[in-house]
Image (cartoon, rainbow, N blue to C red):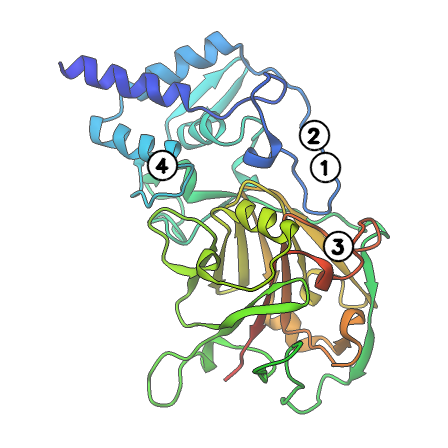
Amino acid sequence: MFRTKRSGLVRRLWRSRAPVEGDGEADSRTHGSGGCCMGKSTKAAKSNPGTEAELKALTHSILKKIKEKQLEVLLQAVESKGGARSPCLLLPSKVDTKLGQQSYSLPLLLYKVFRWPDLRHSSELKRLSCCESYGKINPELVCCNPHHMSRLCELESPPPPYSRYPMDFLKPPDSPDSVPTSTETGGTTYSAPVGLSDSQALQESGEQAHWCVVAYWEEKTRVGRLYSVQEPSLDIFYDLPQGNGFCLGQLSSDNRSQLVQMVRAKIGYGIQLTREQDGVWVYNRSCYPIFIKSATLDNPDSRTLLVHKVFPGFSIKAFDFEKANSLQRPNDHEFTQQPRTGFTVQISFVKGWGQCYTRQFISSCPCWLEVIFNNR
């Protein structure tokens, strides 16, 4: 009975492995094997470090050595595609496995099998803040839960000229902290103080202050109230098992177009917004790309802003506090009637905007977010 249950778990895990590109099952929308964040899909080189039979034999031999409860944890994470909360899968970090002519650490092999078949090195990965191994250096036991990891989004240099926006510099860096209100088409406005620092994260009373607010838009209409964020991490989603955060699926609006309804349904698990020591990271948990524009993602000397494409399963540092404080205040070309600051990030679900897209401005995108940072 013991062997039957363990063997059944191993078989289910193998059936849930990530499809390899070209095997008829792979879908880059789901697994994010496209690679970079510039809207320029770079397919992974077709390397063959081992045959399917070798990979299956190796994976089975490894899984059969893992405790039954740990197999159940791994299966929960893999079958839910990271939607269900799952604990860490702590395994020895220094166990090497060989596939074909190449050696892989145990965590790296599991990440390849269950998430990214084209993964080559641990430097391509970023551990999510929900993981026990987050921030630890060379622990003896490391988390091997594939959905406690994300693929690191590398920016190309120089970026392509398309999808860029010109921006004008309105104020010198030493201008007053107060700035005009956030982009609005009507209703309540929010005045966003410039910047944010860890030392200012708490109010004098000792209570935790919000470090940003999030506005959800459908084309030119803001839907729902501004969502104030106090916790270090926020899930923004349409439909997420055990979801806790900003649920876009619960927001109602009159006269939604067919396109907006279609895109809303594709938001799925959405994104995870996390404030870390070096800035704010965005993790794409959905099955479709997201598009991001942020002043801190571009060269400080550039007079343009680039729209970055982030594939499913990838993370990008969308906002850098130190860099933002050194930037001059740009005027966003999309809303020339209201000055913008370098302390706002715009994120569109599924649909991109810019010169290489039908939509020139984010206000034409069906579903998008505006993240406004606070420095109090």
Q: Earlier in the sequence, mark 4 or mark 3?
A: 4
Residue situated in front as seen by the camera: 326 or 238 = 238
Label drawn at residue 77: 4
Label 4: few (<14), some (14–19) or many (≥20) C-alpha neighbours in 10 Å: many
Q: Earlier in the sequence, mark 3 or mark 2?
A: 2
Disc 1 to disc 2: CB gap under 8 Å: yes
Residue labelled with disc 2: 43
Residue labelled with disc 3: 353
Q: CA separation, marks 4 and 3?
A: 33 Å
Per the image, label 3 sits on a secondary structure element best described as loop
Label drawn at residue 336: none
Which marked residue is nearer to the observer: mark 3 or mark 2?
A: 3
> Measured along the vertical axis of the image, is residue 51 above or below residue 357?
above
> Measured along the vertical axis of the image, is residue 258 above or below residue 102?
below
Going 59% across and 81% down the picture, which residue do you hit? 187
**Where does residue 118 sit, x and y in percent of width and height?**
59, 27
Going 69% across and 77% down the picture, which residue do you hit? 341
